[in-house]
Image (spheres, helix red, strand yellow):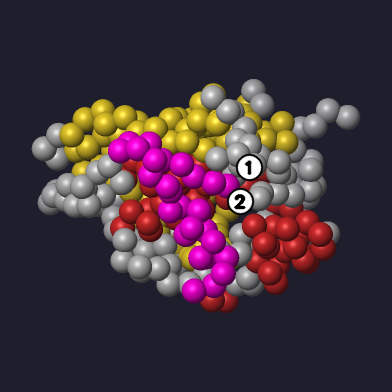
Amino acid sequence: MPEALDALLDLLDLERIEQDIFRGVSRSALVPRVFGGQVAAQALVAAGRTVPEDRPAHSLHAYFLRAGDPGAPIVYTVDRIRDGRSFTTRRVVAVQHGQPIFHLSASFQAYEEGLEHQADMPAAPDPESLPTAAEMLPRHLPADVAGRLVEARAAVDLRYAETPPWGSVGEPREPRSQVWFRTNGKLVDDPLLHVCLATYVSDMTLLDSVLLAHGRGGWAVGDVVGASLDHAMWFHRPFRADEWLLYDQESPSASGGRGLGQARIYTQDGRLAISVIQEGVVRVPRG
């Protein structure tokens, strides 16, 4: 297994310090705060470890309350809100330095038969035909920035279907973006792990579509500042995070210093696996 993926899996392997209390560590990020996708994924790990294995996660709703300190451990406290016949609900609070930095509500459901329909998968190029991050990033970013971004995403093979925001600065276009992603290595057959890794990746690019509408390059080039505010996901069908997933993203609105992104994630054979919505702070720096 590649070293970067092994390090990410270690990050998600929380230490259990009491029955419903877990502790996690952080990894360095491009900005001096904990990556939001990491906190969300770790919180979902904590919740999932208090739920029977035959009840996979079907949704999460989260709020980012404060910037996390990457140099300090994060303590996750799980509240067992409900254990019903079909559904299990958990609430998780992440704490650092005595203050909550993140709040998650997650719901889990025992499998059952039901009505079936889904939105069709949109057209997208074959992921194998697209450049890797290591190939694309140096074309558009200074070498030091590109190198740090490649390192931060080394556990994931993430490929843009079109030029990313930081490759088309000053050229507003339709607020839509597509990326393919999968982990850079095979994973064990653990449904919770695959869901948590998709949660981790889901925070990487969703607000890109907001930037595209205004010709902004984003955090990598410094022409906007921002942070995730809230994040919601619905897990519709089984999937594997080590197989190609299409992240089809768009932004229906930006106002009041906030931008909204919404997306659908499909398996390569066209099954709708996940729906995602996120709002974040997106501000233009004052000169």
Estimate how packed mark 2 is, as few (under 14), some (14 to 19) or many (20 or more) residues with alpha carbons within 10 Å.
some
Q: Residue at x 17, y 47 (%)?
A: 110
- Density class for disc 1 (Cα within 10 Å; few <14, some 14-19, many ≥20) is some
Stretch of the chain drawn in magenta: 1-26
Q: Left of 220 or right of it: where is 237? A: left
Question: Residue 282 lies in what quarter of the image?
Answer: top right
Is the residue 283 above or below the residue 30 in the image?
above
| The furthest residue to the front | 17
Q: Would you name the residue on which mark 1 appears? A: 70
Task: Identify residue for label 2.
Answer: 27
Instruction: Please say whether residue 136 is visible from this viewpoint.
Output: yes
Residue 173 shows up from this direction: no
Kind of residue sitting beneath label 1: Pro
Secondary element under disc 1, as helix, strand or loop, is: loop
Q: Amino acid at mark 2?
A: Arg
Direction from residue 1 to residue 237 in the image, left or right = left
The answer to whether the residues at label 2 and label 1 have Cβ atoms under 8 Å apart is yes
As rendered, which of 191 and 2 lies closer to the eye?
2
Q: Earlier in the sequence, mark 2 or mark 1?
A: 2
Q: Residue at x 24, y 44 (%)?
A: 51
Farthest residue in the bottom direction?
Answer: 129
Please tell me which residue is depicted at 76% across the width and 32% down the height of the picture.
Answer: 284
> Residue drawn at (12%, 51%), measured in percent from left and top?
113
Marks 2/1: CA–CA distance? 7 Å
Give x and y (percent) for residue 242: 43, 67
| Residue 264, position as x, y percentages in the image | 43, 50
38 lies above or below 96 = below
